[in-house]
Amino acid sequence: MLLFIKCIMAMMVGLFLSLIVGFCLLPILREKKLNQRLSVYLKDTHHDKSNVPTMGGLIFILPTIFLMTVLVIMGKVEMTYNLFICLFAFIGYAIIGLIDDYLIIYKNNNKGLSEVAKLILQIIVAIFLFYFFMIAGNESLLWVHTLGIKWNIGWLYGIFILLVLISSSNAVNLTDGLDGLAAGLSIIALFTMGIITAMTGWLEGYQEISIFIFTLVGSLTGFLFFNANPAKIFMGDTGSLSLGATLGMIAILTRHELLLLIIGIVFVIETTTCIIQRVYYKFTHKRIFPMTPIHHTFERMLPEREVVKIFWIVGLFASLVALIFGVWI
């Protein structure tokens, strides 16, 4: 019970700090004209978003880092290996996203880092994370809790970690296309993972990781105040890559990688449809879906706010199902 009280307090402080950062940062980004650069395919439907600042991920990244640093210095939170791994993933992928956002603004188009360059940077960070993961004493196990399956795959687990991190980070990145969509879904997914982590008593540093997760939930909720429709700021790759990698790393540490597929079902659908569309078009020069990511197809049929609400509800329902398997069963 004490842990949940600490998590609630961390969430409240994170929310408060992110609102302060948001009100301070937003005018600066507007003054510097660090605005979102739209894809040519969205010029007609999203023309009103061209003057909205990006790099908004800093609104929840900076307060989270600040609060966790203060808690560690004050001795309220212990800097365990596993907490360090979470923070390294969180900050490492945020830096990759920040570089990408900066290049998009600098080039004045929607092309920042090339796909190859971004992938290489993600792989480098993932390699460091695997190294830290192993020296922290974690085993290279594929663990399906519900079925009681434990499979030691040795060094192949490094490749598995790489796939999880790249998939999760890019999945959130692809979903970040409508006002509040990725932020709302990330809040739901992180809150769910926070509850699961708090119940994972066997994991070294599980309490510290839980506090980190709920701090991020609070900070992200503060960001949503500025990002909800009509958005005053976008999180950009700075925020989306960071959130996705963090979700992936938490799932790896708690051994709920497969459960993340349920929790992040919307992210999975967004990514899968993009892959299907791209492969199908390459071989046939035709499209299966009118537009991908799939939320843009829904946007052609429904108002943006309605699409976001529907996707939020799907994400919430999936997370409730995941909680049944992750905590109860």
Image: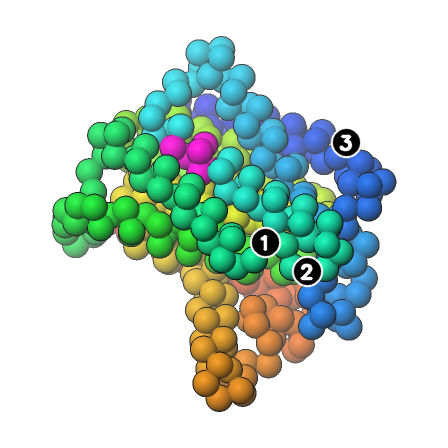
| Residue 60 quadrant | top right
Q: Identify residue for label 2.
A: 110
Instruction: Report the side of 72 relative to 197 (left or right).
Output: right
The magenta segment is: 85-90
For the residue marked with disc 2, what is the amino acid? Asn
Q: Which mark is residue 128?
A: none
Instruction: Report the side of 264 relative to 132 (left or right).
Output: right
Instruction: Report the side of 109 relative to 286 (left or right).
Output: right
Residue 299 seen in the current view: yes
The alpha-carbon separation of the residues under discs 2 and 3 comes to 26 Å
Q: Identify residue for label 1.
A: 113
Q: Position of residue 195 (x, y in %)?
A: 39, 39
For the residue marked with disc 1, what is the amino acid? Leu
- Residues packed near mark 2 inside 10 Å, few (<14), some (14 to 19) or many (20 plus): some
Is residue 92 highlighted in magenta?
no
Q: Position of residue 329 (x, y in %)?
A: 23, 49
Disc 2 is placed on an element classified as loop
For the residue marked with disc 3, what is the amino acid? Cys
